[in-house]
Amino acid sequence: MLGLEEKTLLSVDKCPAQGIKYHITEVYLEELKLYLPIMLENFKVLLKPFFSVIGKSHDKVLLNKIKTYMLGRLVEHGNGYLKTKKGGDSDVKSFVELEVYGAATLKLGFSMKFFELGLSSDCLQGNCKVLFSLHDYFLKLEKGAANSRVEVVSPEVNEDANMDDVHELVPINGVET
């Protein structure tokens, strides 16, 4: 995940490929759906590079894309999770997606994470406003979950279920491992 953060999202090249950063940010959660359900701890690790970028990046377009395409969708899934658990209908199409993303949004304490990042000495001054607004969004969601008395349950992950899908690695001629 360090490679994603340093070599792609925060790369400082002579000819930066901004479109790649933007595309990864836009499709990241969509691509993760293929591997759902995943454990919440693993999901937190998968999001960590984007949290670092929010505090360190000078690229305002990238910050907006992370806020909109990743964190905004997580807030939507958190609201959908609460709505579903209270007995209402949800607009989210995939139940597994709702269970993982919604539960993660409510259980992993993102509001505190954004608050800490905003107060960090490493955080760029211009990014503090973004981090504190994200803190407010997630805090409101977490308080709504606490007030609704909905029990947030981590999704069950059957680690042996996907073992049939693991492909055998084929060595490349001339390359030793």
Image (cartoon, rainbow, N blue to C red):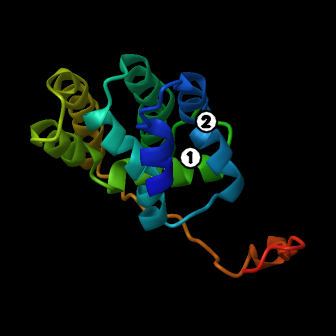
In which quadrant of the rendered view does residue 93 lie? top right
Task: Judge left or right: residue 177 versus residue 170.
Answer: left
Within-10-Å neighbours for mark 1: few <14, some 14–19, many 20+: many
Rendering coords of residue 17 (x, y %): 57, 26
**Residue 95 visible from this viewpoint:** no
Q: Secondary structure at mark 1?
A: helix
Nearer to me, 46 or 138? 46
Distance from label 1 to label 2 (Cα)?
7 Å
> Could you tell me residue 177's position as x and y percent?
72, 80
**Which residue corresponds to the image point at 48% horizontal and 26% vertical from the top-left?**
14
Q: Mark 1–mark 2 contact, CB under 8 Å? A: yes
Is residue 139 positioned above or below 173 on the image? above
Callout 2: few (<14), some (14-19), or many (20+) C-alpha neighbours within 10 Å? some
Q: Position of residue 26 (x, y in %)?
A: 58, 30
Q: Which of disc 2 and disc 1 is earlier in sequence?
A: 2
> Which disc, if any, is residue 132?
none
| For residue 122, side relative to residue 140 (left or right) | left
Provide the residue designation for mark 1. 98
**In this picture, residue 109 sits left or right of residue 72:** left
Residue under circle 2?
92
- Indicate the amino acid at tag 1: Leu
Closest to the observer, 22 or 70: 22
